[in-house]
Amino acid sequence: MLTMALESHHRPSKMVTAEQTSIWLVAGWRDLWRHPRLSLAFGALYAAVGAALYLGLTAMGMGSLLLALAAGFMLVGPLAAVFLFEISRRIEAGEAVTLALVLKGVALRSAQVGNMGLVLSMLLMAWLFAGLVVFALFYPPGYPLPLDSFFTDVVLKPESFRFLVVGTLVGGVLATVAFAISVFSMPMLLDRDVGVIEAIDFSIRATLVNWRTMIGWAATIAIITFFGMATAFLGLIVALPLVAHASWHAYRDVAGKGR
């Protein structure tokens, strides 16, 4: 059944260039300010969740988990951005944009979005588990640590070189897989009447075809998100909608404008 699905829906992807990433960002910025209250409201919601996690983990002396969760957020980012994708889809289609209509549009694809969310959640669990395993291989019990202790006792010590190399490699592999699976699949689930398998297949193939551009695009998303978090999460109010709206336009260029 899986083979039949892939063979019957083998949609071609288009080549994109690194120069187009700036066009996506400009288009994303334009979408953000077409309906700023709605876009910024979603951004504020996600920023509030991030701030709450920071305060909670810090209070429990588990601040080092913030690093894993911050990186893990990149894995499930497309799920968080689904409502912002729907805003951009409606803008492009010339449809009305209200909170009720955006929620309704996502609800119509709730089964597919939910299944994709399950896949991304499993990747997040694998990310966190891999982080704990790597840490346990190099350090005695006592993790997670407060954030300041993690930097002074782990990251900044010369003997931590092997831990950092192995952790970076393991995290890099999982992040690459998650990015390839999700970068175009979630927008496609809103844009076209397809299933999760077809959307994931398209996303992976499109990423492989455009791997050079996608490396730069992934780095751009990471940098914007990092600076959003570094401003006490306030920057995420703008950063997340910008990235989400721009990612919609990236998908549309790769998938083609026709449906």
Image (cartoon, grey):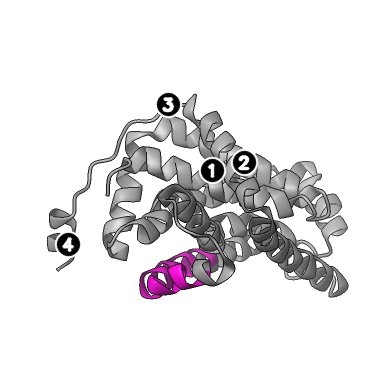
Kind of element beneath mark 3? loop
Q: Position of residue 29 (x, y in %)?
A: 62, 41
Residue bearing the label numbered 1 = 246
Mark 1 vs 3, N-terminal side: 3
* Count of picture labels: 4
Residue bearing the label numbered 4 = 5
Q: Visible in this render: residue 45? A: yes
Locate residue 46 relative to residue 152 in the image: left or right: left
Q: Are marks 1 and 3 in contact (CB under 8 Å)?
A: no
Mark 2 vs 4, N-terminal side: 4
Q: Nearer the viewer, mark 2 or mark 1?
A: 2
Category of crowding for the residue at label 3, using alpha-carbon neighbours closer than 10 angstroms: few (below 14), some (14–19), many (at least 20): few
Q: Which amino acid lies under the numbered mark 2 shown in the image of this protein?
A: Trp
The range drawn in magenta is 103-124
Residue bearing the label numbered 2 = 29
Category of crowding for the residue at label 4, using alpha-carbon neighbours closer than 10 angstroms: few (below 14), some (14–19), many (at least 20): some
The CA span between labels 2 and 1 is 7 Å
Q: Position of residue 74 (x, y in %)?
A: 58, 54
Mark 2 vs 3, N-terminal side: 3
Residue bearing the label numbered 3 = 17
Which residue: 61% across, 61% down? 131
The CA span between labels 3 and 4 is 29 Å
Q: Vertical placement of 75 versus 248: above or below?
A: below
Q: Which amino acid lies under the numbered mark 4 shown in the image of this protein?
A: Ala
Which residue: 47% across, 64% down? 120
Which residue: 53% across, 41% down? 218
Position of the N terminus by quadrant? bottom left
Mark 2 vs 1, N-terminal side: 2
Q: Position of residue 79 (x, y in %)?
A: 51, 63
Q: Vertical placement of 239 versus 199: above or below?
A: above
